[in-house]
Image: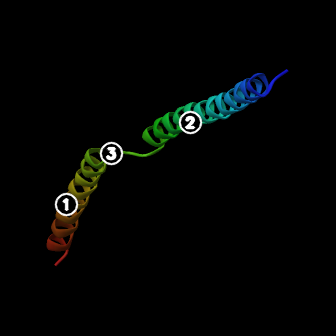
Amino acid sequence: MNIFEILTCLMYIIGVLIMIVFKDKADDLKRQGILLGETREEMARDYITKVEVRSDMAQIINRFDRLEEKLDRFIGEHK
C-alpha cells in the first residue's frame, strides 16, 4: 500500500465519522422539534385564552351586579 491509498482510507473513515455525527445531531434536532410540538399542545390544552378569561370575568361581574341590586332592595325594604 502506498501513502495515497492510506490517506484515501483515512479520508473515508473521517467522512463516515462526520456523517455519523451529523446524523446524530439531525435526529436530536428532530426529536426536540417533536417535543416542542407536544409541549405547545399541552399548554394549549391546560391554559385558557384571554378571551375565555374576559368572558368568565364578565359573567362574574354580572352576578355581583345582580347580587348588589338584591342587597340594595333588601336594605331599602328594611329601613
- What is the C-alpha distance between the residues marked 1 and 3? 24 Å
The location of residue 30, given as percent across then percent down, is 56, 31
Kind of residue at disc 2: Leu
Sequence-first tag of 2 and 3: 2
Q: Classify 43 as above or below 15.
A: below
Residue count near mark 1 (Cα–Cα under 10 Å), binned few <14, some 14–19, many ≥20: few
Cα gap from disc 2 to disc 3, whole angstroms: 30 Å
Residue placed most toward the observer, 53 or 3: 3
For label 2, the residue is 29
- Vertical side of 50 occupied by 15: above or below: above
The residue positioned 61% from the left and 32% from the top of the image is: 22
Question: Label 1 amino acid?
Answer: Asp
Q: Residue furthest bottom?
A: 79
The residue wearing badge 3 is: 49
Q: Residue at x 20, y 57 (%)?
A: 66
User: Circle 1 sits on which residue?
Assistant: 65
Whole-percent x, y for residue 26 in the image: 58, 31
* Quadrant containing the N terminus in the rendered view: top right
Q: Sequence order check: which comes first, mark 1 or mark 3?
A: 3
Side (left or right) of 27 relative to 48: right
